[in-house]
Structures are given as structure tokens and as C-alpha cells.
Image (cartoon, coloured by chain):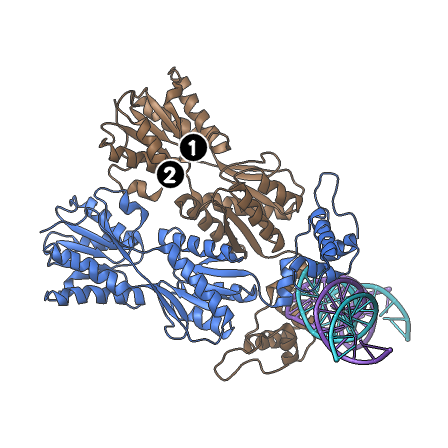
Chain colours: A brown, B blue, C cyan, D purple
Amino acid sequence: MGRLVDGDGVMTRRATIKDVAIAAGVSRSTASRALTGRGYVATDVRERVLAAAEDLRYVPDATARYLKQQVSLSIGVLVSDLRNSFYARLAAGVGQAARDHGYSLVLAEDGGSAQAQVEAAETFVATRVAGVVVTPVSADVTTYLSRHRVPVVEVDRQFAAGACDAVVVDNHRGSREVIEDLIGLGHRRIALFIDETTWTTGRERHAGYQAALAAAGIPLDPDLVVSSGWDVDAARSAAAALLRPDGRPTAVFAANNVLAEGVWRAANDLGLRIPDDLSLVSFDDAPWMSLVTPGLTAVGQDEAALGEAAVLRLLERIAAPEADPVTVTISTQIVHRASTRAI
Amino acid sequence: MGRLVDGDGVMTRRATIKDVAIAAGVSRSTASRALTGRGYVATDVRERVLAAAEDLRYVPDATARYLKQQVSLSIGVLVSDLRNSFYARLAAGVGQAARDHGYSLVLAEDGGSAQAQVEAAETFVATRVAGVVVTPVSADVTTYLSRHRVPVVEVDRQFAAGACDAVVVDNHRGSREVIEDLIGLGHRRIALFIDETTWTTGRERHAGYQAALAAAGIPLDPDLVVSSGWDVDAARSAAAALLRPDGRPTAVFAANNVLAEGVWRAANDLGLRIPDDLSLVSFDDAPWMSLVTPGLTAVGQDEAALGEAAVLRLLERIAAPEADPVTVTISTQIVHRASTRAI
DNA sequence: GGCTCACGTGGGATCGATCCCATGCGGCCC
DNA sequence: GGGCCGCATGGGATCGATCCCACGTGAGCC
């Protein structure tokens, strides 16, 4: 038990609860009760302990507490790529809600790899996070975490529907509505530009697109459903092919912000004017869409609300581990700008 | 010691190293040596232990390890706002480098508040992070963390220059060069739009601006240095005032991406054409700047490189706690687009 | 007076992994 | 043959906070 602070105010050793107890002239148990507020402590003793803690700049060692309590006060967040504004804003939303409830954030990115997701999940298990919020890329993460009894909430898309809580948006409806708008403007040749249709997001956005066309009696043209890789460059070249003069659609619906960026760049590359030569709408309202001219009409998702709902769901799951899984649906909001025009 | 796994493969209790040791028929010490790779273990014994661990789905409890070792394998990251692409990309860069070195990320946002920074720092101390990467908003965080002997690296701006490691860009030079370009195009009335000049970033960008003008023999016009609040709306209205017809500058240099967005929106609001009516350049090349027409000329910062350098610096600091502080400077790259024009 | 009960405090076990130290064994060298 | 050293293993203390339990005191009640 040496000195705790050197001449410059730098601590040579961290104060432990034992130091606080000694300084306050009580036992460790009493100091613990005073600091945590659980159990009986006389008022004057509590104050003496708190003063001693303050004085020694005592910061409780969370690792010791977590070890004893078998759970930490942090939430694991696993997203694909923080450079994508959707994930960044989602993470910000989760972080805000987590902080509001006294949790800190352990953040990991997977770059879209299922393998990386499981590795991140292993870290979560090891650090005993209280729960995990994940945008899954396969069922593996959820399976892994569930096996280890770690509460999970899937956000944005679902791979373990029915077996795991989830927070999603109404993809089908958002998609259908934005296509209905295009149809209302007289469009008949509407392309869907999409990266995959196996995840719930892609599948439902695809289905919403089909439903809108079907309801209007417009036959589906398979050539107008174009798939692309997941990054901007792939989207840009796939879009360039889609926009070649022969058989060009009059409108394009990009199923997410990355694809929209690809279409936008390809249209610029080809000298196509939006909306004069082409109407363009997007699922997911990225920040750039309100900065370009014309602004893009998009199906906006409230990422902060998604993140907050995910944390709330997680906390309820933690409180009631055996309750039935719940899927929360957040509504979308179509943001009308100037990238569409009547035909 | 009950069963570890129930009928569905869900673990009823987590396997501990003791379970692994018993399953492999060795002591906890030997199991620990086999699993960590530190100390002597016979080859066949090691394999038996690893097999047992695999079999029991053993995941070492990091909280126990951290408690014993008095330090965790995670790095704290503290930024202002993930919704700002600069911070998101910086965090992504830090995360990538951290992962590459076996560290996980504890992420916190402060919304620009010094108070929130200290609170986040307290969490970092409590969880015994190995070190912290921070974009400081005052000297408080660094002071607090240093007192508690937590290694810190300041990124983007410095508040504890000389007392703390830092990774920054050459703000003065980036700023000067982009202004020189404007001067080369014939501009004389160049406004600087800036939020603050007390942080190193603002101060140096301001100084670079002044240096370029001085070198060209252009007198400083204090009316052309306009300050604004830190959010887009504040920037937008301040920019609107700056761009009123009487005495309007021919070019504006926005000192960061948020300010650039404010100017961009204000120019649109006022019907000003860029670059015909106004040249605009920015410090910090945000993603939207390559999507708008005309594209914005900007001083680009490599956020991934900043993040990686910060992690490397942190790891060296951890390895040599008493070494002299080092400031690493990352170079900037002017990205020329079409938002400027000769006058 | 003896009983219960609320309040208040301290001792000691506990969480799970690490690591120091003691011990044992076999080979090798002088 | 004795001593030394490398290899290999296990026992037990340790990290810091929590929390169960035992114990003590004094008030209130029959």
C-alpha cells in the first residue's frame, strides 16, 4: 500500500475500494454498500465514504465488477461499414440510447463478412456484453450468440426471424409507395436496381416493387430488375449498362444508398439529365441526396429511431430472457424532392 | 458443476478453464499455458487441452483476464459525432487498425461537450482500456486520462501539445495551398468561413489563409473572416449573411465539411451559381463533394491513415510509457474539382 | 423481561484466469 | 556419481468488487 498520488497529481497506483474503506474507517463491505447504494448504510458513514472516494479519485474497476456479476454494462454493436452513412447513423442512434441507459458501446465492423461477424461475436461473448445489436449478413452470428446465451437484436434485416428480436422498417410498403408515385407520374418502364434479394431487405423491397407494378396492371419485365455488387464502383458500372440507350427505363428505383450513388454517377458519366432523361428514386435517404441538384426523392429511414428501438428491445429481452421474440417495425417516410418527373 | 449444454445445443452455463482442465485431465495451470501459449506444455497435452476447449465451446472470460492483468485488450475511441463523415471515417480507420492488432473498440461520442468527454473518459478508466484515441474539445480529457495513467493520443487537433502524443494533418499548409490556388486564379476577395480559431485546427487553417494572402501582398480584410456556429443550420444562416450582394467575396474557403455544407446550401438558397458567381473550396473532402455539380475542390484528409497512425502511436506509447511525446503529421491532398474558376 | 424486527456493520467466500513458485524427472557433463 | 539444467506439471495466491451471512444494537411490543 504505497502512496496513491505523486507530486504532479499523477496516480502511481489506482485507488481500490479497500483504500477508500480504510480512508473512511470502514470495511470494504460498507464502502461497497455506500458506493453502490445497495443495502443499509448510515447517512454519515455514506457521506464519509463518498468523500473518501472523491478524495482518492476512486474509479471502480469495472472488470472486477463484471467478473463478479457475470455481465458487463456494455452493449456490442456490429455493423458492416461505418463509412456508409446508414450504419454510422444507426450506430450513433444505438450509442445515444445505450448511453441514456448507462451502457457503453463496444463497436465492431465486419465488412460484410459472415466469418468476421462470428469473430466479433466471440469478442462479445468473451467480454460478457449485456447484449448485441447486429445488422446480420447470415444466420451465423445470431446462432453463435444465442448458443452462448447472449441476447441479440437484429436490425435492418432479419436472418433469424421468429427466433430472435428484430427492429426493421416496412420495406415492402416504402418500396411499393415510392413505385406507386412513379406510376402516378406516368412511368411504365421502371427499373429496380438491387444488390441481392436473399436478405429480408432486398426481398421485401423487390416484392414491394412487384406489388406496385402488379396493382397497376404493368407486366413485370425481368430485364428491368438489375442486380449489382455491393460497392459503389460495381454499382456504377452495372448502372452504366442499365442506362445504355436501347431499352433504357424511364425511371430507376435504387434499393439502397450505395446503389443510388452508383446510378447517380453513371447517369452523370453518360450525360443523362435527371429528371429530364431519367427519374431516380432511392431507398434510404443519405445526406448527399439533399445536397445534389436535383435533390433525390427517397424512402427515408430514421436511423436514430432504429438504433433506439433496438436498444429498448434489447433491454426488455435482458429483463425477460424467456419471453417470445418481438419484431418492431419502424415506419419509413418518403422524402419528395426533384428527381422525378411526369412522363 | 452441472451439464454445460442442453438438448438444443444452448449452453446452460459457460465453460470455464477449470472445465477444460478437467476434460483434458490436467490442472488449470497447464490448461492456461496450453491456451495462452505461454510457458511449457507437452505437445500432446496441448492438443488434448485445445480439443477439450473446442469441444466445450470454451470462450475465455476476458473480464477475468483483464482483472488479473490490470489492463484490457480494447482501445477507447472518443469522437464528437458519428453522423459527421469525418468522425465516422476516422473511427472506421481506428477500428480497422485496432482489430489488426488484436484490440477491440469501445466507442463513445461527446456531441462536442467537454463534460461528456470527461464522463466517457471515466468509463474508459473504469473498463481499463489499454489506451484512448480522442478528438478533444478541451484539455480536460487528456488531463483526466493522464492522471489515471491511461495512454492517450489526440487526433485531428491538439489540446495538450507537448504533453501528449498526437496525430494531425498539416492544416497550415493545406489551407495555404488551397488559398494560393484561388489567388492564382485571380481572386482577391477571398472569405474564410470558420467556426472557431481557438483549437489547433481552426487556428492553423486561419493562419494558413493569412499566410497565403500576405505572401501575395493582399491586405487582410477582417470582414472577410466570418465565424459561425458548429452545426449546419447555424452555418447556413451565417453563410447567407456572408453572401449578401453588397461586398460579396468572389471566393469562399470553408474551414470544414459542415461549414462547406452551410455555404453550399446558402448559395443554393440565394440562387448563386458556383463557380460562376462564387468559387468555393473546403477543408475536408466529404463524400458529397464529389457527387454534387460542380464537384467541390477540397483539402482531403485521409481519415483511415489518421486512425491507423493514431493506433500505432498508441501502441508505441503503451510499449514505452515514459518516452517523449510525439506528434505525427499526415499530409493532406488537394482534390481539384470544378467549384473554382478564374476571375 | 423477553421477544421480534429493522437497521447497520464486518468477515470471508466468490467470480475466472493468470502466474509465481515448488516439485519432479530425465539427460548430460565433468 | 553427483550436480546442473531444461522441460513439464500442479498448488495456491492474486486481481478488485460484490454479496451472503453472521452478528450486534436498540426500539417497540406483549
Q: Position of residue A151 (x, y in %)?
A: 61, 46
Residue at 75%, 47% in the rendered image: B4
Q: Position of residue A47 (x, y in %)?
A: 60, 75
Specify the subunit that label 1 lies on.
Answer: A
Residue at 62%, 67% in the rendered image: B69
**Residue A155 - label:** none
The residue under label 1 is A195
Residue at 41%, 39% in the rendered image: A301
Q: Is residue C1 left or right of residue B236?
A: right
- A46 lies above or below B83: below
Badge 1 amino acid = Asp
Q: Residue furthest bottom?
A: A7
Q: Nearer the viewer, residue B97 or A58?
A: B97
Q: Position of residue B215 (x, y in %)?
A: 13, 67
Q: Nearer the viewer, residue C21 or A73?
A: C21
**Which badge, 2 or 1, comes first in the chain's sequence?**
1
Q: Is residue C9 left or right of residue A273?
A: right
- Element on which disc 1 rests: loop
The residue under label 2 is A258
Q: Which image quadrant for residue D24?
A: bottom right
CB atoms at circles 2 and 1 under 8 Å apart?
yes
Crowd band around label 1 with a 10 angstrom C-alpha radius: few (<14), some (14–19), many (20+): many
Q: Which image quadrant for residue B90?
A: bottom left
